Image (cartoon, rainbow, N blue to C red):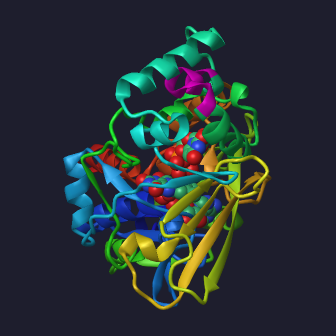
Amino acid sequence: MEKYDYLIVGAGLFGSIFAYEANKRGKRCLVIDKRNHIAGNIYTKKVAGINVHEYGAHIFHTSNKEVWDYIQQFARFNRYTNSPVAFYKNEVYNMPFNMNTFSRLWNIKTPKEAKEIIEKQRMESGIKEPKNLEEQAISLVGKDIYEKLIKGYTQKQWGKACTELPSFIIKRLPVRFTYDNNYFNDLYQGIPMGGYTQIIEKMLKGIDVKLNCDFFEKRDELENIANKVVFTGMIDQYFRYELGTLEYRSLRFETEVLDENNFQGNAVVNYTEYEVPYTRIIEHKHFEYGEQEKTVITREYPVSWRCGDEPYYPMNDKKNNSLYEKYKQLANNEKNVIFGGRLGQYKYYDMHDVIAEALKCVKREFE
Ligand code: FAD
Ligand code: UDP
């Protein structure tokens, strides 16, 4: 006899929301995670009194009021607004691409001047319908910005030339003809005061959780422990890679505690030239306006993904998306398994997307 109604594979945001909502409805849930902690990639941990984002900077942003109200149940958010700075060699630029960036680069003042330069550079490159990330970037912001702030960063981030990458990746960033350094256009933005882990702790309160438990190491036993499975790991691994392997991009994080109180004066500094091996340095205290004596910084190095590495980013290009669609058909036939989250749905989801998807899934399942 099954002991649980749901086995939830993955104690990240998707799995934990599902568990919380199922538990609220009287369902018996077991949540497992192969890591030694809950919260997946939004895990934060206190180091030298500072909440450290263990898996890279996580800034919450959304325009979806339902999602914003939902997450507020679990933490209070501060007014943090992400405005990264980009270092290219010895030059410093504001991100995302806005009048501060354009005026520094071209020594101009007005939106009209900026638009004229971008249009001229776009015309010179002869691009009409952008077919890849390079063409998309040049169409949006011109060749100078592409060369200094996009090309090197993107090639090291994805391990591929910009001409081989899909345009949508660069469209994540706003292009603005106002002096506004906000990295996001969303209505709501902030960082949970006290870190993200508390959110997941609250969601999983009273629910059975087993850490250091890899679904694939005890698959037969675990598949019989519950009526249904919610799977938030890699969808291709679930199907034993039978249609081929999906590609991912991985990262390596190097964290240091420094004996100074302010290393870089900003939470996020991007290093956009190709020759610097990391893409960004995060100084965690600035997410919560910390005034501790020390500081903690993390360098983020993109690395190629091999089986067994952490699959931080799905590679959502044409080839991989079409393979995913085939896995999705297999998934549709697995009547007692729900696939969710960044890896289960193989989508470059941010936290707000994952919450929206999880809530949709809860509605489908229980209403
Ligand atoms: P995950 O958090 O990956 O959780 C999946 C869990 O499943 C993991 O804990 C994993 O260990 C576990 N698991 C996998 N396979 C198995 C298995 N076989 N057995 C047991 N357990 C398993 N989003 C934003 O909104 N803002 C940001 O600023 C932002 N920055 C980001 C920066 C980086 C570097 C990265 C990588 C992501 C960022 N995101 C950001 C995205 C955000 O992390 C995700 O949207 C969200 O955490 C995904 O939640 P999830 O539950 O789908 O997946
Ligand atoms: N990007 C860039 N230069 C930057 C920052 C971002 O070219 O200084 C590009 C890069 O291709 C990156 C994409 O914009 O992959 C999306 O950036 P975002 O900050 O959203 O990436 P994430 O935080 O998800 O890694």
Q: Is residue 5 magenta?
A: no
Q: Is residue 182 above or below residue 269?
A: above
Q: Residue at x 39, y 68 (%)?
A: 29
- Horizontally, is 24 left or right of 219 in the view? left
Residue 247 spot, x, y in % from top left? 71, 41
User: Was residue 142 drawn as part of the magenta stretch in this picture?
Assistant: yes
State left or right for residue 139 relative to residue 91: left
Whole-percent x and y of residue 347? 53, 41
Q: Position of residue 197 (x, y in %)?
A: 42, 75
Span shown in magenta: 135-144
Question: Measured from the top left, where is residue 34 in percent x and y?
Answer: 62, 70
- Numbered label tally: 0
Vertical arrangement, residue 130 with respect to residue 212, above or below: above
Which of 288/77 is in front?
A: 288
The main secondary structure of the magenta stretch is helix
Question: For the point 47% across and 70% down, which residue is it?
Answer: 39
Identified at 75% across, 36% down, the residue is: 160
Residue 12 makes an appearance in the image: yes
Q: Quadrant of residue 159?
A: top right
Left or right position of 276 against 198: right
235 and 63: which is toward the camera:
63
Residue 346 showing in the rendered view: no
Looking at the picture, tell me which residue is in the foreground, 274 or 162.
274
Q: Who is closer to the viewer here, 184 or 124?
A: 124
